[in-house]
Image (spheres, rainbow, N blue to C red):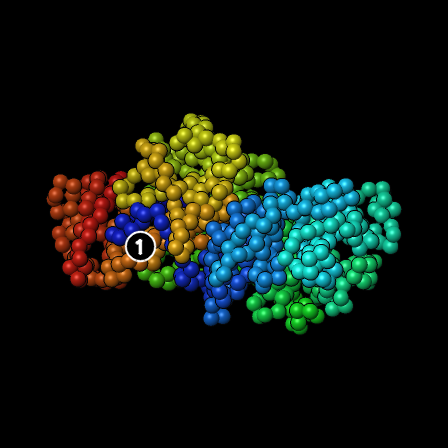
């Protein structure tokens, strides 16, 4: 949920640019965090990454990340020593993977894709020349068992080891028993044995208890001929998700093993003390690869051997393998651990580098980032507030708000992370915090809504700014509860023009509700399928999030909608129309719809000298910056800021331009109520409007080049 104060407060003469639905991803507006300028601030964040190296565009080698929590791909690379990112979903197969691993199975030097599918393990061959292209090689990997050929099943919650286990050059597979965990199963690829080359996927179920050990529970393994029944009351205690990575770290010819378990924070390392074909593990350790910083990731740590820092040598990356932060015990802003390899590929030496690699070069607030664009310090240029989950309190990560102050100016914004605890929201122990900015006669109020998990209800707090001290205070000193659930998205808006703010609620089930405010924040449900948007029984259009805005210049309210598909739509003049238009984002020669997370929150601002901008937050916890497709098509055009609009009669109408302008204000009946006057360049001017009647006026302007423009200004009580 976002503000619509920004829409009321700022309007511009280049407004027609924003009437288009095609946007361009921007990354050029600088952001300073902890004194450092971020390389790629508007990359959207990272939650549960599965990284691998990939070469695109012939020679651009980088890191492809599948983010399990947000179900999308991003590609990261370096350009003149600075990190860059582009979305890569549209260039990957249309799957819903639980895991996604790149491996060169046919030894052609190009990475192929192994992932989960509807019927088992899907394999896509990379058949591209200059750019990766994916061709389905196998819709369901098979393996030869004792009773014949069967599906090679891998749980979507697991990460298998797809590596050359027997050292013959083709890719074998290690995976835990998909039903109960416990033992590791070895599926041997017979491509080299049968055909003398490695380009086949011909598997045999070779060993049901590979490595001669059994996983029982966190830090509990059965070695040396024992089973879990010998050491854990007769059963496997831990049958949840698993992760595996097979890697010969000591260059002795056999593969060692890294493993993780669901609900266990440790990464286990098992040294292979046997030999190829007689692999044997007799113990584990948790202080490898670097005893100065053991892995502690509160869910299911998974290890990846990939060149994360792009120095030509594979590193060890560790990340959580999960869909959701169910108990809010994981800091999603620090989920890509790098153990840098300071030696060679075949004989690595790992040293701890950081817990937030790549994340430290972008804005990443944790998870569920909800932006609001607002001039918080009343200095003309717009700032950004971001609500998210990620503030540690009593062992959980709760909701908080961060202030990004615009330290540049209206025409050339620069943002700096100034306050990581704006309004002290963690004091309320809320999660999934959302914000609305409500215009009032003496400024604005900030409505902060979150979920009180311990009590199973929502809480909304209202903050107002003390005009004498400049401090924001909790206006009511107590909260009120809304008729919503934890994952619902709320927009406040005065639908019936009675001065009370009603509710538009995007439901987790995909429906849109309208609740009428009966006074004192007591609500009556008017529609369970507002705008004919009903519950989605297909499971594809869930997590609906509305954002009320003024998309075009007709002063009629429009609504932007996002949903689980990662797509956005707009309904113009939604109170009188039901036509839906998709919002697309330009990427190369393609206009993409799926560019957002499985749940995303949008805000609209006036930035970069009057250009309308969408700031998008989402599950990944970061922000994206989207500008209109033709936003830079007329760089020479003078830009005029007119705000607030609508303007109350007890307020001043403020003007600012980057060029000298001649201004006049005309009533709708053609009467000149403010004759031509000169507006200097880059100097704010305030106009008295208290003597004017309520209504719509036309503000006309002419810049130093003789170019004319006009727009409507609404004056009201």
Pick the residue in front: 197 or 595.
Answer: 197
> Can residue 262 be seen?
no
Location of residue 530 in the rendering, given as x and y in whole percent from the top left corner: 41, 30
Q: Which residue is mark 1?
A: 630
Q: Which quadrant is the C terminus positioned in? A: top left
Q: Which quadrant is the N terminus positioned in? A: top left
How many numbered discs? 1
Q: Residue at x 54, y 38 (%)?
A: 486
Q: Residue at x 77, y 47 (%)?
A: 182
Q: Secondary structure at mark 1?
A: loop
Q: Residue at x 71, y 56 (%)?
A: 194
Among the 4 quarters of the image, the one containing residue 515: top left
Location of residue 517 in the rendering, given as x and y in whole percent from the top left corner: 41, 31
Q: Residue at x 81, y 52 (%)?
A: 213
Pick the residue in front: 643 or 117.
Answer: 117
> Is residue 412 shown left or right of residue 401?
left
> Is residue 582 shown left or right of residue 88?
left
Q: Residue furthest bottom?
A: 343
> Can residue 536 be seen?
yes
> Is residue 105 shown left or right of residue 587?
right
């Amino acid at each position: 949920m976002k503000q619509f104060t920004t829409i009321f407060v700022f309007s511009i003469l280049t407004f027609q640019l924003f009437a288009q639905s095609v946007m361009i991803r921007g990354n050029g507006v600088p952001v300073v965090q902890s004194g450092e300028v971020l390389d790629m601030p508007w990359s959207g964040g990272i939650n549960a990454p599965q990284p691998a190296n990939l070469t695109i565009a012939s020679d651009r080698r980088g890191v492809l990340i599948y983010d399990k929590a947000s179900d999308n791909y991003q590609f990261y690379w370096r350009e003149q020593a600075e990190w860059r990112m582009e979305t890569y979903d549209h260039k990957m197969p249309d799957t819903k993977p639980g895991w996604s691993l790149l491996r060169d199975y046919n030894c052609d030097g190009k990475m192929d894709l192994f992932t989960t599918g509807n019927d088992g393990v899907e394999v896509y061959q990379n058949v591209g020349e200059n750019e990766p292209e994916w061709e389905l090689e196998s819709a369901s990997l098979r393996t030869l068992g004792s009773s014949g050929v069967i599906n090679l099943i891998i749980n979507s919650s697991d990460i298998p080891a797809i590596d050359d286990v027997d050292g013959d050059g083709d890719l074998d597979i290690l995976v835990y028993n998909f039903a109960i965990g416990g033992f590791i199963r070895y599926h041997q690829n017979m491509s080299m044995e049968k055909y003398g080359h490695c380009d086949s996927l011909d598997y045999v179920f070779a060993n049901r208890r590979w490595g001669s050990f059994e996983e029982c529970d966190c830090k509990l393994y059965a070695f040396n001929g024992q089973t879990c029944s010998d050491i854990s009351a007769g059963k496997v205690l831990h049958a949840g998700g698993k992760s595996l990575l097979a890697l010969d770290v000591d260059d002795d010819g056999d593969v060692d093993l890294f493993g993780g378990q669901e609900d266990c924070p440790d990464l286990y390392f098992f040294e292979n003390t046997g030999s190829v074909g007689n692999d044997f593990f007799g113990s584990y350790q948790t202080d490898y690869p670097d005893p100065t910083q053991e892995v502690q990731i509160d869910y299911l740590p998974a290890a990846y051997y990939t060149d994360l820092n792009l120095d030509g040598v594979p590193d060890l990356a560790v990340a959580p393998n999960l869909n959701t932060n169910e108990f809010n015990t994981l800091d999603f802003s620090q989920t890509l651990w790098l153990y840098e390899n300071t030696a060679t590929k075949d004989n690595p030496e790992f040293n701890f580098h950081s817990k937030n690699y790549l994340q430290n070069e972008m804005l990443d607030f944790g998870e569920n980032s909800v932006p609001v664009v607002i001039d918080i310090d009343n200095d003309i240029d717009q700032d950004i507030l971001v609500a998210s989950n990620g503030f540690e309190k009593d062992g959980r990560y709760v909701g908080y708000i961060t202030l990004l102050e615009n330290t540049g100016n209206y025409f050339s914004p620069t943002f700096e992370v100034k306050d990581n605890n704006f309004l002290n929201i963690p004091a309320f122990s809320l999660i999934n915090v959302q914000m609305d900015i409500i215009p009032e006669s003496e400024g604005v109020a900030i409505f902060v809504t979150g979920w009180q998990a311990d009590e199973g209800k929502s809480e909304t707090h209202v903050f107002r700014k003390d005009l004498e001290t400049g401090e924001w205070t909790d206006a009511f000193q107590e909260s009120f509860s809304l008729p919503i659930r934890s994952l619902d998205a709320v927009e406040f808006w005065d639908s019936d023009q009675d001065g009370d703010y009603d509710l538009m609620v995007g439901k987790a089930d995909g429906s849109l509700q309208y609740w009428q405010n009966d006074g004192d924040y007591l609500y009556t449900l008017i529609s369970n399928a507002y705008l004919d948007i009903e519950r989605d029984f297909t499971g594809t259009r869930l997590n609906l999030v509305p954002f009320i805005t003024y998309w075009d210049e007709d002063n009629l309210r429009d609504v932007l909608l996002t949903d689980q598909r990662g797509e956005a739509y707009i309904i113009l003049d939604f109170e009188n129309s039901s036509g839906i238009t998709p919002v697309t984002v330009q990427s190369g020669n393609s206009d993409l719809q799926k560019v957002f997370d499985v749940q995303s929150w949008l805000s609209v601002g006036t930035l970069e000298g009057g250009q309308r901008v969408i700031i998008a937050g989402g599950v990944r916890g970061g922000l994206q910056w989207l500008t209109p497709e033709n936003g830079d098509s007329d760089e020479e055009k003078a830009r005029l800021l007119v705000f607030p609009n609508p303007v109350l009669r007890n307020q001043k109408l403020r003007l600012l331009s980057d060029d000298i302008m001649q201004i006049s204000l005309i009533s709708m009946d053609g009467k000149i109520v403010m004759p031509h006057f000169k507006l200097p360049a880059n100097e704010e001017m305030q106009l008295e409007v208290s003597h004017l009647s309520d209504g719509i006026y036309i503000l006309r302007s002419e810049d130093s080049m003789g170019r004319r423009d006009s727009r409507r200004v609404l004056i009201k009580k």
